[in-house]
Image: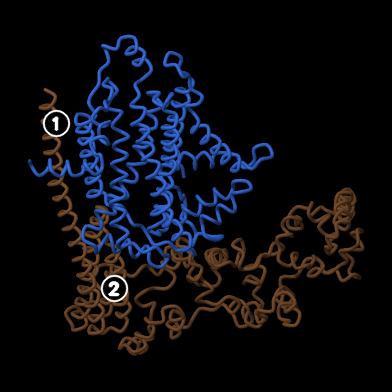
Chain colours: A blue, B brown
Amino acid sequence: MIPQRTMYNWLDERLGWDALIAPLRKKTVPLHRLSYWYFLGGITLFLFVIQVLTGILLILYYRPGANEAFESVQYIMTQVQFGWLIRSIHSWSANLMIFTAFAHMFSVLFLKAYRKPRELTWVTGVILLFLVMGFGFSGYLLPWNTLAFFATKVGTEITGQVPVIGKPVMIFLRGGEEVSGATLTRFFGFHVAVLPGLATLLILLHLLLVQRVGISVPPKLEMEWDANPAAKREMKFFPNFMLRELMAWYVALGVLGALAAVFPWNLGVKADPFVPAPAGIKPEWYFLFMFQTLKLIPPKVWLIDGEVLGILAFGLIGLLWLLLPFFESDQPSSTKRWITGVAVFALAYGAAMSVYGYFAQ
Amino acid sequence: MGISRSNIRLLGRARLLLPAGLLLLSASLGCGQTTNSCLDCHSALPDPLGVSQEKFSQDIHAQRGLTCASCHGGDPTSDDADKAMSRKAGWKGKIDRKQIPQLCGSCHSDPAYMRQFNPSLRTDQLSQYTTSVHGKRFAAGDGKVAVCTDCHSVHDLRPPSDSRSTVNPVNVANTCSHCHADVGYMSAYKIPTNQFAEYSKSVHHDALMVRGDLSAPTCTTCHGNHGAAPPGVDKVQNVCSNCHTFQAQMYEKSSHKEAFQAVSLPGCVVCHGNHGISHPTEAKLGTGPDAVCMQCHTPGDACDQARAGLQRALGQLDEAIKSADQVLSVAESSGMDVSEARLGQDQARDSLTKARVTIHSFRTDLVDQDIQAGLKIAAKNLQAGKKAMAERNYRRVGLGISLGAIALVLVGLRLYIKQIES
């Protein structure tokens, strides 16, 4: 018997390996002209794994603390062998992951893949997107540079505007009244312990749900295939789809490597809490649409503070977004067109506001 | 003027209702304000008798509770113009120009009185004024020279710290130029009138007005304010040395000091000029139109050779800094971290500045020490830039190889998929 087979049998006897991977063997992926959108979830997962691996390597040298953080990242970028590559990949991968997570969400929306019985898959996915944005917000501060410092100051200030709970939440996030070294160590804790733990659990749940309920097809195609099962086309998940997914991962790896080598992530200037904020301070691109909206709301709307109203509106929209599948019809024949309309509007609004926010003074 | 007392009285009565109402309102609100009925009429009069409420409210004296009567006398509490402006009530009318310095000095030279408003305010302005060229000529009966109100303005007099004040550092040159740049007005004094035009092109004006450095010199910094006078030929370096300390120290020990004194040359301004001081460049050491050394020295002599050596050495360091800057900029725009070398460039620039200061010792050995120190730092920074560029190229080669490997894997995967699906 060949050694691989012996090893396989040894594991199977102890873990019931065969039974465990049996569903994967049977798993199929629907094949149609929009199947390539199915790669986005896998690419996001791949980028998450890259984040975990490069993050672990960065922790070996990173020192959280107002007096050490910037210098330790500078050390990583200039002295540690391939430190620049690891940090640049970590930063670029973070941004690409957020982008692919958004793209994955909108592809699910437009393909109406959130419909019954996949409501919980959608809910876990949206929560994961919020967590990924939390990763971005907490990680942005860690190099302790001027832009990150003031962006965090503005970001946490906005949190503080929420009625009743805002102020305590802001103090909890900052570790005090002001953004300081205490905020940095706190954000480091969120970034490397709390958020990864929650995200890992939710990713497992998300994947389990995808495995349990299978991959969705667009409503029109679903009706066609239900009416004529012979027309149904599928691809085996393993190895056919997996190999294609692997190709997508390699492409993502190439893009990451190119970005890191040609545009290494800038470190900026060390944060100084005593200097005035630089003019035109802005958050990262994925928060820009919210930031710009809050800037455009008048200071007072009726008797309510404009910023508070904006924050409450975004909170409500976030909650409704999470519950979106529960407004959808159960039947593929009667899906709600207005949900697609809302998705188109959200995408157009988010993109337009982000571009406006980027160029606005 | 065509405005009689009765007209003023009528105007005053016609406008009585509004100020009276405002007075009542302010009194009822507890806004204790000194009664100043003069403005009831004078705010409606044309110049030169007119003083608007708005204008006078900007005046530091009004803000500290003084009224028109504080200078002009009279009874500002009376609504009757005849009573308010009666000689019996001490009314002085228009202040005679000859009385202005003494009138201002009656308060401003009284330390006990001024202490209540601003204990740190000087009270020697009048005594200083009497020592100034303005004060001396004034005492001799020249009514055209500046008195207090010419520079400080009147009725809307602001403290010097107010950027709108005529004596705020940013406005001083303009204030002086009202007379000193007026060819007709100054013709009797036979002094140049191009000082303001010259100053406006100078490095000092640039520092003050463009860079906003309020410590940069304006007219009063070198000439004094209340005691304004031109510095004597032998005192020029004392004026400049107030700011340019190191240059002055070097010059004091140099051979040029004695040489200049021997022929009554006024120190610093021989090479740098006075009002129109331009940014000094290496060209001053050259032989071109901006050259200064060769105005006195003979071509080919030992000093000319030393001058050429100094110019060459400064140019060499300047070039070395620029070369390092260029390489570091390219490396930086390629995303390489060269912050340490950038910081080092500041040190190299400091060495160049120091060498330029040391020029005032007129000793090549001392200048060379600074030049060599700067060249060493610039060379190190250039090396750091080149190393960063080599690292950038290494990364790009690595990227090319990695992308090639990824492309090969992709082709392999594609072929394998094709094979298992065929």
Q: Nearer the viewer, residue A320 or B316?
A: A320
Residue at image point 31% right, 53% down: A55
Number of numbered discs: 2
Residue at image point 18% right, 82% down: B301
Q: CA distance from mark 2 to mark 1?
A: 62 Å
Q: Is residue B193 above or below residue A198?
A: below
Q: Evaluate whether residue B379 shows in this view.
A: yes
Which residue is the site of mark 1?
A: B414
Pinpoint the chain carrying mark 2.
B
In the displayed structure image, the side of residue A349 where residue A63 appears, left or right: left
Q: Position of residue A132 (x, y in %)?
A: 40, 44
Residue at image point 80% right, 70% down: B70
Which residue is the site of mark 2?
A: B352
Q: Quadrant of residue B330?
A: bottom left
Could you say which disc has been placed on residue A232 in the image?
A: none
Q: Nearer the viewer, residue B22 or A144?
A: A144
Q: Position of residue B383 (x, y in %)?
A: 18, 66
